[in-house]
Amino acid sequence: MVTAPRKFEFELVSPEQLVFSEPVDMAVVPGADGDFGVLAGHSPLISTLRPGVLQIWQGDVVEQSLFVAGGFAEVNEERCTVLADEAIPVSSIDPTLVTAEIEELEAELPGEVDPVAKKLIETRLNIARAKLWAAKVPTTH
Amino acid sequence: MPSLKDLRNRITSVKSTRKITSAMKMVAASKLRRAQEQAHAAQPYAQRMQGMLSRLAANYVVTPAAPRLLVGSGKDQTHLLIVLTSDRGLAGGFNSYVVREARRQIAALLAEGKTVKVLTVGRKARDLLRRDHRERIIDSLEGIGRKKLSFTDATVIAKAALDKFDAGEVDVVTVIYNRFKSVMAQIPTQLQLVPFQLPKAKPVAADPHAHHGHHEHVVPPAVYEFEPSEEEILAELLPRNLAIQLYSALLDSAAGEQAARMTAMDNATRNAGDAINRYTLAYNRARQAAITKELIEIVSGAEAL
């Protein structure tokens, strides 16, 4: 079935600023339980995010790929809102810097005895690994 | 009667003071502009989050599994007050108003028999509160946003408060800060962070336009799917919301500080100008008097011959 392409309002907001707000064709959001694509008319949903890549599609191409460190997504009849903890363009990630960060964190992890601090390091490690992965896997299209 | 030299010295000194205050005023003005821009840029996130929370609340039924941040610890005994001030003074009544509000609140809580703990942010809060509430200050943070305030600063404070709450050391968390109303007015404000008051879900049908805030569009309560469960989302959303509210408070406080300093320095510059005028007048009078006196001496000396 072929329907006329319909756009929907998509917003990406980080605590510091409104990053993106435009009608788009599709958004692929890294949900906590797996990536999900949002098209116009998606059923209402609230989800948490995992560190990963958010793709914004216009027509058949990925217009923007952004790395988000975590946050929330809400889809309702009117729009899709993503509240990201941190949102940076994938192209601006420096793999060498991230690799250095991962190594540093990995070295730190075994020595940490405080469970709270350990959890914090693990979280940061997860984010850094996802970031590195995002930078190394070039987005197709 | 001060001597001519004294007056001259005083005029020079007031003039250099005026230079300093007028420079500080200009620095504060440019910092204020930046702080306001930053506060403005941070608004969308806070608004969207409020919107999301209120839509969640519209359908939410409190269950035994409800996050403690929402329902509280079941007690109301120990209060944690987070007092936001600046690190630096010379900002008029900016810091003393907040501290006065904090003192009032501490006294009121103590009178009710509550236990009060204080977390100070900014050197001024610590310096001013340490005199009479030293034993209540559990921690003092400084240098927050010395360069540029970031969201991380807010998460650090939020985490400190959350840890205390999770450990059962405090039951209620309130932040006291200067709300930025306008450049001329900063209002000392109290905001309860824990337990969190979910925005009341108002009946949508009654008046859709009076629903919530200006920018947030009215969305009819939809039946949302949750990924993962509603409880888990709330458990993540609430601490995040706390950090965001603190972040807004910090931004308000930072903008307010610069506004207060600008106003204070503007007044100081004007007062210095007035003082210089007064002293110059006195100086000229004294000089004229000295000249007249010398002339009289010459004339009467000549007459005596």
Image: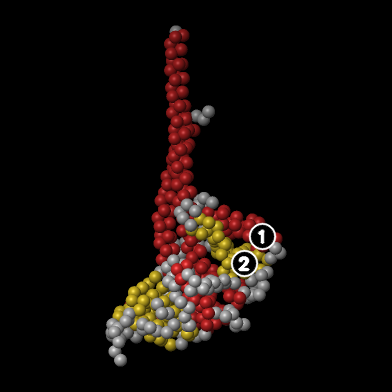
**Residue B146 percent coordinates (x, y):** 47, 61
Closest to the observer: B271 or B58?
A: B58
Closer to the chain start, of discs 1 and 2, is 2
Q: Residue furthest front?
A: B206
The residue depicted at 46 percent of the width and 71 percent of the height is B208
Task: Identify the residue under disc 1.
Answer: B108
Vertical position of residue B110 compared to residue A105: above or below: above
Q: Amino acid at mark 2?
A: Leu
Q: Amino acid at mark 1?
A: Ala
Count of marks placed on residues? 2
Q: Please state which of the two labelled residues, at mark 1 or mark 2, is closer to the viewer.
A: 1
SS at mark 1?
helix
Q: Is residue A28 visible?
A: no
| Disc 2 residue crowd, few under 14, some 14–19, many 20+, Cα 10 Å | many
Snapshot colouring: secondary structure
The residue depicted at 30 percent of the width and 87 percent of the height is A3
- Give the chain letter at badge 2: B
**Residue A112 percent coordinates (x, y):** 55, 80
Which of the numbered marks, if any, corresponds to residue B80? 2
Q: Is residue B183 left or right of residue B98?
A: left
- Give the chain letter at badge 1: B
